Amino acid sequence: MHGRVKPIGADVTIGQISLLHTLQEMGPLRATDLAHEIGLSASSMTGQIDRLESEGYVVRHRSSEDRREVVVSLTPLAARVLGESQERMAEELDELFSALSD
């Protein structure tokens, strides 16, 4: 992929952004723990993870401790896109506050 990464938000819902930020802050989590952190049911979490996985933002793998458990983690793409989104938001807030102080 050349140039800038496509901005998050065009194809990701607010709930999914929350899920990605949770993974960014807490690191890889079991799908059940992630659902609990965000306040979703297990079935809703599965749908969210399915979509994010198909877009390349998360990966699922089986826990090495208990093969029945699914662990979800961010991909490098998600980490890069989240970082760019946070930088853009900070720049926009700086511009807004600068305009207010003028």
Image (cartoon, grey):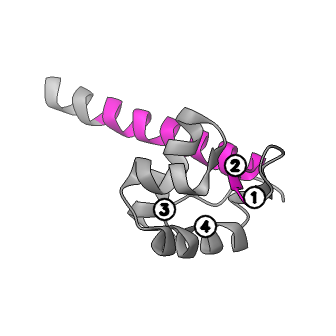
- Residue under label 3, please give it: 16
Query: Which amino acid, by three-letter code, is at mark 3?
Result: Gln
Mark 1 is surrounded, within 10 Å at the Cα level, by few (under 14), some (14 to 19) or many (20 or more) other residues, namely some
Q: Nearer the viewer, mark 3 or mark 1?
A: 1
Query: Which amino acid, by three-letter code, is at mark 4?
Result: Ile
Magenta span contains residue 23: no
Q: Nearer the viewer, residue 94 or 9?
A: 9
State the mark number for residue 59. Answer: 1
Query: Which amino acid, by three-letter code, is at mark 1?
Result: Val
Name the N-terminal-most of marks 1 and 2. 1
Q: CA distance from mark 3 to mark 1?
A: 14 Å
Q: CA distance from mark 1 to mark 2?
A: 6 Å
Q: Tell me if residue 11 can be seen.
A: no
Left or right: 93, with 32 as reference point? left
Name the N-terminal-most of marks 2 and 4. 4
Q: Position of residue 17 (x, y in %)?
A: 47, 56
Asked if the residue at tag 2 contacts the one at tag 1, i.e. Cβ–Cβ closer than 8 Å, the answer is yes
Name the N-terminal-most of marks 4 and 3. 3
Asked if the residue at tag 4 contacts the one at tag 2, i.e. Cβ–Cβ closer than 8 Å, the answer is no
| Residue name at image x 70 percent, y 52 percent | 71
Name the N-terminal-most of marks 3 and 1. 3
Q: Nearer the viewer, mark 4 or mark 3?
A: 4
| Residue name at image x 63 percent, y 67 percent | 52
